Amino acid sequence: LPARELMVFLDIAVFEIILAYLEKRDWKEAFFSVLPQRKGAVPLGEANDPSKLALSGKEDQHNDSDSS
C-alpha cells in the first residue's frame, strides 16, 4: 500500500479499537476483537500456548484468499 493509504487504514483501525473499548471496557478484548484472527496475534502471556497457536493456524488456512 502507498504510505497515504496505509495511514488511513491505521487511523481507521485505531478508531475501531477505541470504539470497541468504549463498548467492552476492556482494552485486551477490544484490541483482539478488531485485529483480524488470520494475523495470529495472541496476548503476550499466551504466546507459548500450543492451543492458541493451533487455532491461529486453522484460521490462516481458511483466510488465505484475504491476504492478497
Image (cartoon, rainbow, N blue to C red):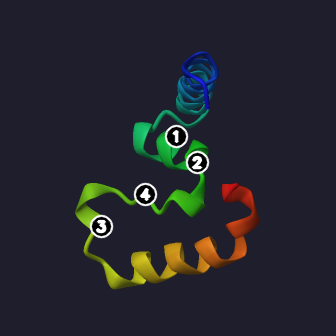
Which is nearer the eye, 39 or 64? 64
Residue that mark 4 sits on: 41
Dot 1: what SS?
Answer: helix
Q: Is residue 54 left or right of residue 58?
A: left
Q: Secondary structure at mark 3?
A: helix
Question: Which residue is tagged 1?
Answer: 30
**Mark 3: which amino acid?**
Glu
CA gap, disc 1 and disc 3: 17 Å
Q: Earlier in the sequence, mark 1 or mark 3?
A: 1
Residue on which disc 2 sits: 33
Q: Residue furthest front?
A: 2
Q: Are marks 2 and 1 in contact (CB under 8 Å)?
A: yes
Quadrant including the C terminus: bottom right
**Which of the labelled discs sits on residue 1, or is there none?**
none
> Upstream in the sequence, badge 2 or badge 4?
2
Q: CA distance from mark 2 to mark 1?
A: 5 Å
Q: Is residue 38 shown above or below 28? A: below
